[in-house]
Structures are given as C-alpha cells and as structure tokens.
Amino acid sequence: MKLNRTLAAVGSLAIALQMATAGNITGKVTLSGTPPPEKDITPLKDDAQCGKLHPGPVPKTQFFVVGPNHELADVVVVLQGDSLKGKSTGATAAPAELDQIGCIYTPQILAVQTGQKIHVKNSDPVMHNVHTTPTAPGNKEENRAQLAGGPDLTFVIPQPEDFLRFKCDVHPWMFAWVTVVDHPYFAVTGKDGTFTIKDVPPGKYKLVAYHRKAALKGIAKDVEVTADGAKVDFVAEVK
Amino acid sequence: MTVSTTRQQAWLHRFALLTALGTLGLVGLGGLVTSHGVGMAVPDWPTSYGYNMFALPVSLWLTGGIFHEHTHRLWASLVGILVVVLTRWLGGKKAQLPLLVIGLVEILAGIGLLRLGADWKGAGHFLAGIGGVVCLVGMVWLRNAAAPGRLPTLGWIAFGLVQLQGLLGGLRVVLDAGDLAGIRLGTLLGIFHGCLGQLFLALVAVIAFMTGRWWSQPPERITSLQARPWFVTATVLVFVQLLIGATMRHQHAGLSIPDFPLAYGALWPDMSATAVAEYNLKRIEVTAANPITGFQIGLQMTHRLLALLLLATVALCVGMSRDRGLRRLAKFWLGLILVQAALGAWTIWSNKAADVATAHVVVGALSFVTGVLGCLIYFRRRVRDEAPGPAGKSTSDLTRSVAA
Ligand SMILES: [Cu+2]
C-alpha cells in the first residue's frame, strides 16, 4: 500500500516534470508554385435562398488560401510517434466548432481529437443537412437535418481519419474536411501560414503537414522536441 | 368497328401519349436530381423530413436541392397514378378484379406494416396509399373492352415496373450508405433506378405507339429489311451508352476527364495511379467532391468511342432504309444522335452544368425510344410479310380489326 502511494507520487512528479520540460513546436508553411485558380460557386449564387445571403460577388472555392508571401493556410500539421498513440484527451477537451454561414462551412478545414465533441451550428436562415461520409473503419456515417435557427448538432468521431468529409445534401457545394487525431498534438495553419503545437513532451517524432490539394498524403519531417520546443517549416508544392 | 370504339381508341391513345410525356418529364426531373447531386436532399423515404410526402411545408420544398428531389417524388406519384389508370384502360373490364385484389392486398400489407412500429409508419402509409389508388381505379365500373393484342399485357408490365421503380428510388435513398462488394448502395441502386427509368419510358412509349392509328392502319408496307440489323445494333448501343452514362453520373465525382475532344491534353489519357492522383490534386471541385478513378476515366473514354460507333451505325440505318417512312425515322434518329453528341461535348465544356447534363439525359432517353420504336416497326412487319394472312398473333387481330 505504502509502496503504491510512493509509486503514485513518483508518477505524478514525473508528469509534472514532463509538463515543465514540455516545449511548443512552431513553424510556418509556405506554398511554392502557382495554384490552379479557384472556381466560382455558381450553384450557390443560383440558389434562391443562399444566393440572397451573398449580395456581393459570387463566393469562390477555398482550396488554396495563400498569403502575399506564399503563406499557406488550412494546412493540418500533426505530430506522429508511437508514444502518442491513444493519448487522446478528446473526451475532456473543449468542443470544436463548425459553423454554416451563408451556406458555406466555416472553417472548411478543421482538426479535432478522437472522442472530442464537434458542435455544428447553423447561422443561416436556411435549413441544412449535415452528412458525414467517413472512410475509416469504426467511424459511422451520419446524416442529420438542421432547421434554420435549430439547436447545434453534436458529432463525435471515435477513430482517427484524415480529412473526413462533412457535406450538406441540400446544398451540394457545401463541404468541410475534418481531420481526427488520437492525441492533442496537432494544429491548423492560420492565414499567416504559422502553427503552434503546445506542450509537446520532449522526444523524437515525425511532424507531418497535410493539405487537401498541395499535400494530400502529407509532407513528413523528423523533429526533436526539447524543453525549448522546436521550430519546423514546410514548403508545399504545386506543379 | 363502331364510331364509339374508334373514339374510345383515340382517347386511349391520347391518354397513353400523356403518360409517355409525363414519364419523359419524370426522367428529366430524375436527371436534374442527379445532375445537381441532391439525391439525398430528402434523407428519408417514403416520408419527407418526417412529413407525409404530400404535406411537406412549401418552405422546405423550396429549400436548395429539396426542390428537385421532392418534385421528382411528387411527379413520380402522378405518373404512378396515370400508369394504374392506363393498365385498367388497356386491360378492359377484365382488369377490374385483379386491380381490386392487388389494391386490397397492398392496403392490408400497409396496415400490417403500421402495426410493426414507428419505424414502419411511413412505409405503411405509403403502401396503403398505393393500394388505395389501385383499388379506386379497380372500382371504375366501365364495361370497356380490352385493348387488342398484347397491349393489356404490356399494361400489366408497366403496372409492375412503375411500382418497382418507385421502390428502387426509395431504396436508393434509404440504403444510400450501405455497401455491396465495396460499391456504395446509393450509387448501385441509383444506376439501376436510372436505367430502369429509361426502359420504363420505352415501354410506355411503345404502348402509346401501339394504341395509335399508325399501328392499326399502317400507311405503307415495308418492302426491305436491309436496315433492320442496324436498327437493332444501334438501339442496343444506345442502351449501353445509357448504362455507361448512368454509371458515370452516379459516381458523383464530376467530370473524370475535363477536356474534349482531347483527354487531359492527349488522344489517350494516362490512367496510371500516379497520374490519377495528380488529376485529383489539380481538380478544383465546386460540387461532387468525390475523387475520380482510373475506372471512371476509362468509362468516359469508352462512352466517347461508342458515341462515334453509334453515329456510324445510325448513319448506316439511314443509308440502308429503303422505305420512306422508316428512312425519315432513321434521319430523325440521326439528328437526335448528333444533338446528343453536341450536348455531350457541351456537358464537358460547361464543367457539367446541371441543366446541360440533364438535357443530355433527356435526349439520350428520346434516342432510345426512337430506336425501340424503329425495331418494333421492323419486327412487326416481318410477321406480316413472311407469313401473309392471319399469322402472327399480336398483329393478326389488329389487322382483322382494321379490315372490319
Ligand atoms: Cu446546406
């Protein structure tokens, strides 16, 4: 009994130490090459209800969100390593949010943990239907209607999967792509192309950057994380 | 033949024509649903968002793709009713009892489903509703004679097919996420539903044609059968094209080859896995964001090549036809095929605009109907020419009624 207690104390001390020595991985993703031009979402404009929500120019697809200095947004950067597998804290993590605004998913690229709640909101005066089409075994396809002003829908994805598609069957141009990871060490690049993965336990890992069009299968780099963290940049390429 | 039966026949013909036109419209609406990629816009069936399908609030009906899908369902119900009436009309008084029995069985089965629990409520109401329509039509107490020849049988086949087709359409929605041998059931059933729709349209068109004056009093005899094998070949080819087209459309992957007349800038596109991965990365999908596969690229190339072959075959039909009427029919057919080829090219150039792709489906359906009617004429003639007199059962009574 006493031994157990001592062991537990040592254990928590180890965790505390690890937290103290854990570092952040930061970096930036840039795009080289000229991406194909985005397309007008004409069916949105042609839709009586959704079209009204966009009085300005026709909204465009958003595959390549690129900054003035080639900074690439919407890149999912995921840490990979045997020690991370099954370390999901999704059950206790704050819910992620996916909104439908002007008949477009916002954000279109999202990353969550397995078991983490995803709240899907409907900010439109229009009915949507949220249809997940997973491909990984263990993730079930779901299809739920959401009336205008209806309550948020909650989705929980149990298994890891890259770019799980959320779509609306009523508005066939509406897509969101949700990457599901079984640990908390990942990030999505912002408009400035940067990302931060916080509190990574020291060690050697692989860091992989995924982009729907520029790096579907991922660009992998070795990374060693120390108490000072690590810095890793990526260059995604389009031909 | 008395005046009243002639008049009755004329009305039957008009009604059959109306049913055929309604069915063509239904094929068009179904095409619109698939072109827009909104086959699942109403995720339940036979209910619509839990409502009885005839009671869906208009505000929901007018929302996005629900409009296409729900209109398709309502229009289909209308065509269903037309076909039941047509069956009764073609079958004459003799059709009354079977209709009453089938209708009653459907009503009872529907009530049985209602007792299975809440999950079966929609299906129960639906089946009972169909049964009710069939019963009502069965109750019509007109002592009309059956239509001549095989027409009553054709009516019964249409009666069965229209219900099977409705069921397939419903299952395509309900079983969408299912899987058979690695193929999504929504895709598989969608293809079946699309092709059966085309066959059904051809059947109703045949009925409309056979109830018409041209069939009972042909203006000319057919003297040459030279073009017949080409008519048959071309009709089969058109159907193969419809099959391929339905398979391409129900992948919901957009254009597998985005350029025409070249394919990815080449005469024959690279279909290797690396090339296909590259194509997928370069695509900017607006809708239909399923990845394309080498299989689909191959399918589109086959569709293109068969179109050329078809064009040549129908041109042969024109060249080989010796009789004026049939030659005119073949020319009309050739015109349709040319329009169809243009629509196919336009479908690609417009990046598969929904209305263009749907026009391609409708003209495809018309081409198939034209081929089937041409074959029908040729095969009926054979019976008469090779065995003159009261031979061939299906035509002899018609000929006799004309003589009388
Ligand atoms: Cu929507």
Image: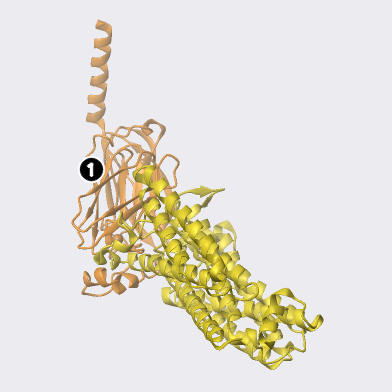
Residue at point 24%, 20% (across, down):
A12
Q: Quadrant of residue B133?
A: bottom left
**Res. A148 image quadrant:** bottom left
Ligand number 1: quarter of image: bottom left
Q: Callout 1: few (<14), some (14-19), or many (20+) C-alpha neighbours within 10 Å?
A: some
Q: Is residue B401 left or right of residue A188?
A: right
Is label 1 in a helix, a strand or a loop? loop
Count of numbered circles in the view: 1
Q: Work out whether residue B100 or residue A207 is closer to the camera in this orientation and state it.
A: B100
Left-right relation of B214 to B183: right
Supply the letter of whichever chain is orange.
A
Q: Is residue A106 above or below residue B372?
A: above
Q: Is residue B386 visible?
A: yes
Question: What x and y, as percent, mark residue B351?
Answer: 45, 73
> Mark 1: which amino acid?
Pro
Where residue B132 appears, as percent x and y from the top left, is 41, 60
Which image quadrant: the N terminus of chain B?
Answer: bottom right
Which chain can be seen in yellow? B
Position of A65 compared to B16: left or right? left
Q: Is residue B254 above or below residue B103?
A: below
The quarter in which the C terminus of chain B is drawn is: bottom right
* Tag 1 residue: A95
Point out residue B80 in the picture as x, y percentages from the top left corner.
46, 67
Report x, y in % for residue A79: 36, 41
Quadrant position of residue B44: bottom left
